[in-house]
DNA sequence: GTCCGGAGTT
DNA sequence: AACTCAGGAC
């Protein structure tokens, strides 16, 4: 539900959704049209079908447990690089970063050069190899969402401003 | 590289 | 009215 969808909007729908489908078995045996009703409020309706396919695959082919292997996760419908990394980090406890549009924007401004998602991911995993990667990763997402927005970042409120390239030398208007 | 999509933000 | 949204499939 979070794919290209604002987190506050996705959260509202998800809370209703998880109330009707508290267990994965219910989702796998459900009427797809009923699942689609939730996604119709969010757009990108193809995610409904992909979600059902992925959940059924985990139940029927993975013993009901999320596989903790990047290659295996990518086999699931709707699971790309980002979601695979989120699951490996938050579900499996592995040392993976997950870089969304917020993290790319924050780190690119901080470094002063455009970064690819794979580059930003490597930077985070090396910089926090000793630990604390998950809370830092989430903090960077929240920073990009609440302070370092795409339009007019609120640099005076940013805790990273003293070391940030964007703050020391903002781009010409 | 392009498309998907309703909804919140500027 | 334009932009953007915790990306992924093609």
Image: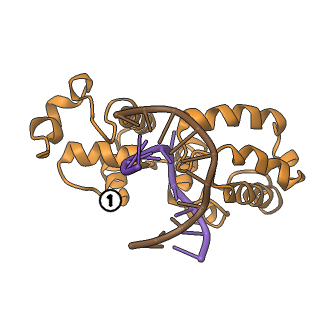
Chain colours: A orange, B brown, C purple
Disc 1 chain ID: A
Residue position marked by numbered label 1 in the rendering: A116
Residue extending furthest top? Answer: A157
Q: In the image, residue A127 lies at what x, y percent?
A: 29, 44
Residue nearest the observer in this picture, A46 or A77:
A46
Answer above or below: position of A142 versus A54. Answer: above
Q: Is residue A147 left or right of residue A46?
A: left
Q: Quadrant of residue A119?
A: bottom left
Q: Is residue A98 left or right of residue A31?
A: left
Report the residue at 83% width, 36% height from top. Answer: A20
Report the residue at 26% width, 22% height from top. Answer: A157
Query: For mark 1, does the 10 Å Cα neighbourhood hold few (<14), some (14 to 19), or many (20 or more) residues?
Result: few
Q: Is residue A128 left or right of residue A109?
A: right
Report the residue at 77% width, 51% height from top. Answer: A36
Report the residue at 27% width, 34% height from top. Answer: A153
Q: Is residue A61 left or right of residue A50?
A: right
Q: Secondary structure at mark 1?
A: loop
Q: In the image, residue A75 lies at what x, y percent?
A: 64, 67
Q: In the image, residue A37 lies at what x, y percent?
A: 78, 46
Quarter holding the C terminus of chain A is top left
Please give the count of numbered marks on the rendered protein.
1
Q: In the image, residue A86 lies at what x, y percent?
A: 53, 47
């Amino acid at each position: 539900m979070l794919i290209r969808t604002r987190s506050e909007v996705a959260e509202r729908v998800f809370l209703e959704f998880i109330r009707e489908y508290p267990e994965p078995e219910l989702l796998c045996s459900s009427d797809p049209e009923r699942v689609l009703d939730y996604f119709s409020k969010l757009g990108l309706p193809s995610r409904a079908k992909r979600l059902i396919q992925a959940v059924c695959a985990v139940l029927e082919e993975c013993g009901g447990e999320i596989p903790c292997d990047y290659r295996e996760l990518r086999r699931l419908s709707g699971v790309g690089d980002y979601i695979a990394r989120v699951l490996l980090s938050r579900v499996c406890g592995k040392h993976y970063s997950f870089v969304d549009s917020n993290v790319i924007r924050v780190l690119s401004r901080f470094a002063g050069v455009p970064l690819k998602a794979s580059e930003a991911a490597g930077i985070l995993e090396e910089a926090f190899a000793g630990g604390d990667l998950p809370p830092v990763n989430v903090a960077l997402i929240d920073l990009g969402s609440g302070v370092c927005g795409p339009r007019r970042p609120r640099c005076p409120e940013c805790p990273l401003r003293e070391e940030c390239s964007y703050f020391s030398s903002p781009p010409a208007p």
